[in-house]
Amino acid sequence: MSDRQALVNYLAEHDARCPSCRYQLRGLTHDRCPECGDVLRLGVDGDDPAGLGPLLAIALPATAAATSGIYWLLFIVQDIAIDPLNSSYGPVDFLLTFALLLAAIPLILVLAMRRAFVRLPPKRRWMLARLSAGITLALIAIDLAYNLLLFY
């Protein structure tokens, strides 16, 4: 029995979803997903087919950085609202706040383009996740160091 026939036989009796687009494949008669066109294969996939590992690696630091950016922004707005001429925040504070808010961009892009992200090869997904998380964690470290210098 060929791999293609084994896949068709399996899908005749089992519910399964396309690893790329999550389309329901039960009853499929060929080895391509009718939704996204990806070639399917029957096997045990040890990788994270839904791409959740890399997504979490992007989401957690990006959320932390954006939250810190919002926190800073609220303090700056409050300080300016109380006394606009004598604000204790300078250009570094504004730049750091802006950078922290920008750290959410990779998360927004991945969520908006989730199907394209999941279709990437696992190595590429993890490379993008590591790059995004590294940059974001560096921004958080700079924010922490700046706060320690500023307040202590």
Image (tube, helix red, strand yellow):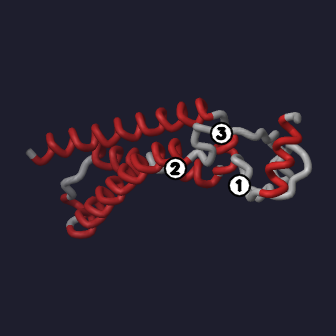
**Mark closer to the chain start, 2 or 1:** 1
User: The N terminus is located in which quarter?
Assistant: top right
Mark 3 lies on residue: 44
How far apart marks 3 and 2 lie (CA) works out to: 29 Å
What crowding class fits label 1: few (fewer than 14 Cα within 10 Å), some (14-19), or many (20 or more)? some
- Position of residue 10 relative to residue 4, above or below, is below
Determine the residue positioned at 27% across, 43% down.
143
Specify the quadrant of the image occupied by residue 81: bottom left
32 and 140: which is toward the camera: 32
- Give the percent coordinates (x, y) of residue 149: 14, 40
Residue 24, visible in the rendered structure: yes
- Left or right for 120, reference 148: right
Tag 3 secondary structure: loop
Mark 2 lies on residue: 107
- Position of residue 82 relative to residue 3, above or below, is below
Mark 1 lies on residue: 22
Question: Which residue type does callout 2 highlight?
Answer: Leu
Residue 106, visible in the rendered structure: no
**Mark closer to the chain start, 1 or 3:** 1
- Give the percent coordinates (x, y) of residue 45: 64, 39
Tag 1 secondary structure: loop
Tag 2 secondary structure: helix
What crowding class fits label 3: few (fewer than 14 Cα within 10 Å), some (14-19), or many (20 or more)? few
- Give the percent coordinates (x, y) of residue 7: 82, 44
Q: Nearer the viewer, mark 2 or mark 1?
A: 1
Question: Which residue type does callout 3 highlight?
Answer: Val
